[in-house]
Image (cartoon, rainbow, N blue to C red):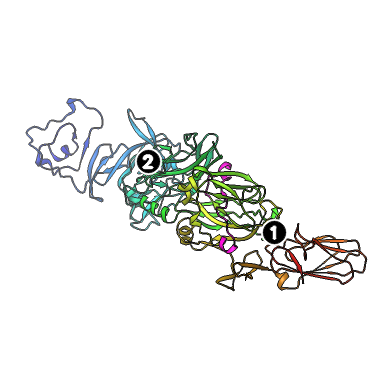
Amino acid sequence: MDRNTFKNTWLTGYKITETDYSNLLDSVRFFTDPISSSQIVDLPNFNDLNQLLFNTSPTGISSNEGAVYWNKKYHTLNVQTEIPGVIIKLGEEEQRRVYNGTGTILTNGTVVYPVNAVQDPTNPDLYVWSVDRTDPTNQLKASVFGVITADIAPGAIGRVTVSGEVHNIDTTGFPPLSTLYVSTVSAGVLSNIKPTVPNYAITVGKVIQTSTSGTIYIRAADSNSSISLTNNFGSQQDPTGWVNNSGITISYSASARTITLTGDLRYMWQGDLKTLTSPWVSSPHASGDANYYLYSTDGVNISWNTSVWDFTALMICGVTLQTSISPRNFALSELHSLMPWQAHREFHQTIGCYRLTGGGLTPGSYVLNSALDTDTTPSFDSATVKDEDNITIIPSLLKGSYTNMYIGPNSKAYISTGNAFPFLSSGSYMLVNDPISGVNNVGINKGYYNVYQILIPVASDSQSQLYRMIMLQPQATYSTLTAAQGENTNSLIFGDLSAQIAEYVLYSRITYYAYTSYANTGKCSIAGVSYLSGSKLTQISSGFAGMSNPMTTQGSLILGGIGGVPTELFKGAPLQIPHVTADGSTIEYINFTSSNIGNTVNTISSNYTVSGTDYIILANAASGNIIITLYTAINNKGKVLKFKKIDSSANTITIDGNGSETIDGSITKVLSTQYSILSIVSDGTNWYIF
């Protein structure tokens, strides 16, 4: 058999055994259909073949399926596939047959993902992947199977390269060695711009040659496999957590006792990317009184537990439930973000939750040193709090809608919602909680009491939102404002909520003063407002475990003082100057405002109640008798007021003390003649003429 005869021989089912013919081959073509024994060419007397040497510059190559020949350009052996123009370069790429079920043409260079397995229309005994364009903006389409190597018509079979080099790809604009991803603008299109959250950054490969007929290298990617952890995090144990926890909303159903998650529910579990279908609803937790925690310890099963999660778990939320004594029922958001579990534990224990902005008493919603209910019930601004995982915005709270808390028997935290006041009272004085015995005692006359505001990053449902700001009942009585504002917040007790306290933020402190002559609820006025302030470290180390006196008075202006006690100008409050009592036993404060140190003048012609900004009042009684009612003398020691009758009529002007308070021992004083004057000063209890 000569060279021309041999090079067109059809070979199948046997080995060539003649070395003398090994240098004669341009190409070899294998049968692609079943053949009979009569079609087999018998080459007798050939021994084992040492090598098969192809012509390195072949001509007249067959385009029929099954042709094998040497590719001079890429220096590799080519196999012609069933698709004209699509060859397999042995050793340089791996291909898969796929089906185009999209209804549109899948063009050369398109990145695709596997949709489902379908019967091969050319061979019903086989199944192939049906593919569609990869879309990094859609979790269900955000995986890579391979890159189309030639246009595939709708309903037709084609080929994708799943690993190795792909040639004749337009890589214009992609620098050599740049990483290729799937575009977030056009599905299936290559891009060198890495997608950002909430999109999926799927690595396709690298650019080898930049050209209109360039070359790229495709990394191996089978089926709809997860994003490789080693490509993204470099570890096969971490991280565990939610990919985009800020894109998830948590809602709690108190009636169904379930949690619903909506949004981007992708999560990593020990290096594997997983997802839940949004909305995802948990199983119900038990109905008994307890703190329940929702988390997964295997990355698949998410269940309720009464034991606090370990930091290797996938955390979702905690629910505190109490129905049998003092009802409380709310969910606390705790979506575990992506980080090594050791770091998560360390951040939780050393940082916890802290305030970023807001949360203070709303200006104008309260008045210092006023014994009126409307002045002792402040509103609160919205707040932003942050922990190692989440940032939470806590909506503002209007006065008259408080959630109050005290510690009852057996260290139970008793919480009630919808209260008109930020404290509980006995009908006279406010109550003082003894958290050790669980008893609430009635406050005393001239006592100072601290009510603390606690900010909590609760779930988004209306039930949980009732607990976003909790007012902690006073736990001690103090005899002076200084002592009250020096209370060590580390001594506060939170009962059975202590396990969750690292997720809470202690911020505002309202110091109330109780006095027997006050007629309002709690017999009290606001004597001062303080805030936990400073750096993040100061807040988290002092909020519940750290500094001895973390609370600081917001906006304090130090003017000097006596006996080590500073003079402070409180934000929204009068200037307070310390004054030592005659016996030297107590430091009292004299309040000064513009009426003490300025020349405020107010002219009136009808009944009038003196305000904290008044100093001189000119009264014109020409139209009838006038009654002027004083504000309380209590907590206004040193305050001076002056009154003058400026008309010539016989009508009188009566100055009336607040409640049972007196003026030089009398309930009232009367000015009856023109230009008569009354000047009075408060001693902190009553008024005196001077």
User: For the point 36% across and 54% down, which residue is it?
Assistant: 179
Front-most of residues 76 and 232 = 232
Q: Quadrant of residue 673?
A: bottom right
Residue 524 in sight in this render: yes
Front-most of residues 276 and 306 = 306
Does dot 1 land on a helix, a strand or a loop? loop
Left or right side of 246 for 584: right
- Three-letter amino acid code at disc 1? Ser
Report how far apart the C-alphas of labels 1 and 2 lie in the structure: 55 Å
- Answer whether residue 457 is magenta in the image: yes
Name the residue tied to disc 2: 297
- Answer whether residue 47 is magenta in the image: no
Which callout, 1 or 2, points to the residue nearer the camera? 1
Q: Position of residue 222 (x, y in %)?
A: 33, 41
Asked if the residue under mark 2 is in contact with the one under mark 1, i.e. CB atoms within 8 Å, the reply is no
Tag shown at residue 404? none
Front-most of residues 556 and 22 = 556
Left or right side of 178 for 453: right
Going from the N terminus, do you reach mark 1 or mark 2 first? 2
How packed mark 1 is, by other alpha carbons closer than 10 Å (few <14, some 14-19, many 20 or more), is many
Report the number of numbered marks.
2
User: For the point 65% across and 64% down, which residue is it?
Assistant: 573
Does dot 2 land on a helix, a strand or a loop? loop
Q: Position of residue 322 (x, y in %)?
A: 52, 39
Q: Position of residue 118 (x, y in %)?
A: 37, 31
How packed mark 2 is, by other alpha carbons closer than 10 Å (few <14, some 14-19, many 20 or more), is some
- Three-letter amino acid code at disc 2? Thr
Toward the front, the furthest residue is 583
Residue 615 in sight in this render: no
Q: Position of residue 670 (x, y in %)?
A: 85, 65
Name the residue tied to disc 1: 370
Q: Which residues are magenta?
A: 456-484
